[in-house]
Structures are given as C-alpha cells and as structure tokens.
Image (cartoon, helix red, strand yellow):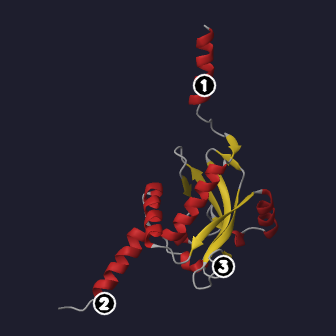
C-alpha cells in the first residue's frame, strides 16, 4: 500500500501537465533557447551585417565586428508564453512574444517582413510608452546575445536548419539562396 501511494505521488509529479493559466519562472536553459532563436533569426534573415559598429565589439578588430547586444527576458512564463525585448537591426528595438514548445524549442512571434506594426502582439518598442519600456528592462532578466557580422557559412547554414525545425520555414533557404543562384547564372557567361 505504501509503495502504491509513493508511486502515485511520484507519477503525479512526473506526468502532471501544466493547467491553463499556469505561471512559472523562466529557466536559464529557456533563456538560452530564446537567445538561440534570436541569433538564428538574425542569421537566417541575413541581418547580421546590420550589427556592424553596433554594441560592444568582442572581436577587438573594427574590420571584423562581433557584437554583444543586450536582451531582456520577462522572468514569468504563462501557458508556455514569454516576452523579450531586444534590438533587431534594422527594425530597431522589439517587444516580442515567444512560445516555448514542450521540447524546449523557442518560437518567436511575429514576422520580420511585416516590420512589427503596433497592431500585433510583437511590436517595435517605439510604439510603447518610454517609461513602460524602461520599467520592463529594469524588472526583467538582462542577458546578451552575440552576432558575428561576417559569420562562417556553416553558422548561417546551421541557423537556417534550426529555423526550419523551429518554424518550418527558412528565409535564407527560401529567398537568399535562390536569389544567389539566379544572380550567379545571370552573371555567368554563356558558351
């Protein structure tokens, strides 16, 4: 009987799924998953060059800029959703909703091609009250992300592959690579 009670208590802890409205604190692993999602999107959309001369240069060489940029993560997660503020060049500072899947992968809300309008849950902070943004940054967890403005092709390829696993779409593979291929065939001399 005692073993049955212990087994029931342990299994309820192991197999209990969060209920609707479940609130909890974001973990360090989840913060790193948010950072990874942000970095992957930047590389996938080819925005890394926009970070040149922005943020702290960890490379120490002005010709090869590696930016360290601040990112602010809401410490509270509700129903698997969180919020983050960071600078997404060339759009500016973004207030962004994200979802944490059951496998721990983070999905960023909003499409950079739509430029984060004020009508969406993820928007540019310029549409928010300055005092509110300042307070959120003060209250939230401050971390950072790194962007190499001249990444090795492998870095971009890996980011693109993670984006496909994350969202089913890669801007780099759908738009950038086909455009490069067309440009190289147009530029190539005909025999």
Looking at the rendered structure, which numbered label has been put on residue 27?
A: none
Q: Quadrant of residue 85?
A: bottom right
Q: Quadrant of residue 178?
A: bottom left
Q: Position of residue 36 (x, y in %)?
A: 56, 60
Q: Position of residue 161 (x, y in %)?
A: 43, 61
Q: State the CA–CA distance, disc 2 to disc 1.
A: 64 Å
Image: 65 above or below 84: below
Q: Position of residue 108 (x, y in %)?
A: 56, 59
Q: Quadrant of residue 56?
A: bottom right
Looking at the rendered structure, which numbered label has been put on residue 12?
A: 1
Question: Extreme left residue here?
Answer: 191
- Toward the viewer: 99 or 118? 99
Q: Dot 2: what SS? A: helix
Q: Report the residue marked by disc 3.
A: 54
Residue name at image x 79 percent, y 70 percent: 130
Q: Report the residue marked by disc 2.
A: 187
Q: State the CA–CA distance, disc 3 to disc 1.
A: 49 Å
Q: Dot 3: what SS? A: loop
Residue name at image x 55 percent, y 75 percent: 48
> The N terminus lies in which quarter of the figure?
top right
């Amino acid at each position: 009987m005692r073993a049955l009670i212990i087994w029931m208590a342990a299994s309820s802890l192991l197999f209990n799924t969060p209920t609707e409205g479940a609130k909890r604190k974001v973990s360090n692993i989840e913060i790193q998953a948010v950072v990874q999602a942000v970095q992957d999107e930047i590389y996938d959309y080819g925005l890394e060059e926009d970070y040149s001369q922005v943020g702290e240069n960890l490379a120490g060489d002005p010709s090869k800029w590696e930016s360290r940029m601040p990112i602010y993560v809401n410490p509270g997660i509700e129903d698997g959703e969180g919020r983050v503020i960071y600078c997404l060049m060339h759009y500016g500072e973004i207030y962004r909703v994200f979802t944490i899947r059951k496998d721990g992968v983070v999905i960023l809300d909003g499409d950079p091609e739509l430029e984060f309008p004020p009508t969406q849950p993820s928007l540019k902070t310029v549409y928010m009250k300055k005092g509110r943004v300042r307070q959120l940054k003060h209250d939230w967890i401050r971390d950072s992300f790194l962007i190499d403005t001249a990444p090795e092709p492998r870095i971009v390829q890996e980011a693109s592959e993670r984006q496909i696993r994350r969202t089913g779409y890669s801007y780099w593979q759908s738009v950038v690579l086909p455009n490069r291929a067309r440009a190289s065939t147009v530029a190539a001399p005909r025999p």
